[in-house]
Image (tube, rainbow, N blue to C red):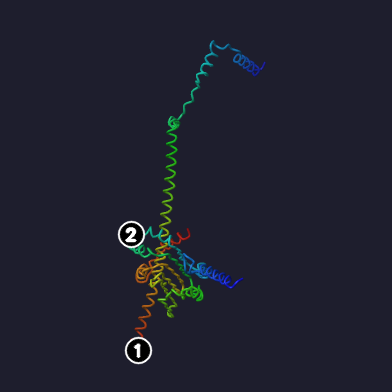
Amino acid sequence: MSDMNKDLNRMDDALKHALQRQEVPDGFTGRVLARVAAGDSPRRPVSREPWLGFFTQPLVRWAALAAVAVAMVLGVKLYNDHRERVEGEAAKQRLMLALRVAGSKLQLAKAKVNEMNAGQSTNRQVKE
Amino acid sequence: MSKTGTRKIVTTLWLVLLLASPIFAGAQDVKIPADVEKLSAKAKETVEVTMDGPMLRWASKYLSADDPEEHKAAKLVANLKGIYVRSFEFDKEGAYTAAEVEALRSQFRAPGWSRVVGVRSEHDGDNVDVFFKIENDKMAGIVIIAAEAKELTFVDIEGPIEVEQLADLGGEFGIPKLDHKSLQKAQKGDRR
């Protein structure tokens, strides 16, 4: 007989031994039924991170949700304020640019008029 | 159809046409001809500012009272209804035609407008026109058209404005206070 067959037989015996019918201890059924009737459920496994267990409490959960919501609203508001300020600054720059262009062209007109007046007075002086 | 009915229809049509005309167009009375708007394609640099009343009020909220120039600007724009600027700078001369400039000028030969400055310089070819809009004996707007050899500028300011104060904002001794930074910033803002 080969070693392999020996191993298989040994496993077979072990299985038979493990699966053989055993008598229930006295009062076992009664104890199980009593616990079911009492509503006793098996204990939940304890979380590995103890701080996560803190959030299992409803009040804390709602507080956390409210904090997240407030943070989100504040974030959106801050972002909008920032964007509005940036756009406002850009609009101000455009306004200043428009006024500077207008002002410089008014000055050009003024300079041209002064130039012409000066030219005319010079001509008058030359004629005299 | 009776004569009265026909007259009513004609009157209504006239009213509709009148209300649709640029004079009653609301935000901006003065129209910039399409040919002039197209000049930006040929221009080396374009300044394009379009600000109506609400936009002006919003922008002026950001003018600082501590900065003397901005403080002056805030006082200037307080009662304005709009500012519209188109300025094109070209690489070479002859980028625009006299007809295009004339199309702009012709709008201000209408009643209510008064030409206060009209300079035609044969020496350097610079032409500058300044028109005032008069309403109830008060100044209600100003239009400046400056046609220079390599530059064409059109400015329309609607509302009462102090001309001397506006000229002050143009810079010292006629040199515009225009730096590249402010121009680029403003152009970026316009694109946005």
**Against A75, is A29 above or below?**
above
How far is the residue under mark 1 from the one under mark 2?
53 Å
Residue A109, given in percent of the width and then of the height, sits at: 39, 74
| Quadrant in which residue A119 is drawn | bottom left
Residue B89, given in percent of the width and then of the height, sits at: 46, 69
**Against B133, is A28 above or below?**
above
Q: Is residue A121 found left or right of A45 in the rendered image?
A: left
Amino acid carrying label 1: it is Lys
Tell whether label 2 touches label 1 (CB within 8 Å). Answer: no
Name the residue: 38% across, 64% down: B79
**Against B154, is B62 above or below?**
above
Q: Chain of mark 1?
A: A
**Farthest residue, direction top:** A26
Q: Which mark is residue B162?
A: none
Which residue corresponds to mark 2? B65
A24 or B110, which is in the foreground? Answer: B110
Q: Which class describes the residues within 10 Å of circle 2: few (<14), some (14-19), or many (20+)?
A: few
Which mark's residue is nearer the viewer, 1 or 2? 2
Quadrant that contains the N terminus of chain B: bottom right
Of helix, strand and loop, which one carries label 1? Answer: helix
Q: Which class describes the residues within 10 Å of circle 1: few (<14), some (14-19), or many (20+)?
A: few
**Farthest residue, direction right:** A1
Q: Which mark is residue A127?
A: 1
Name the residue: 32% across, 62% down: B68
| Quadrant in which residue B178 is drawn | bottom left
Residue B152, given in percent of the width and then of the height, sits at: 46, 71
Amino acid carrying label 2: it is Ala
A69 or B81, which is in the foreground? Answer: B81
Residue B159, given in percent of the width and then of the height, sits at: 40, 67
Q: Chain of mark 2?
A: B
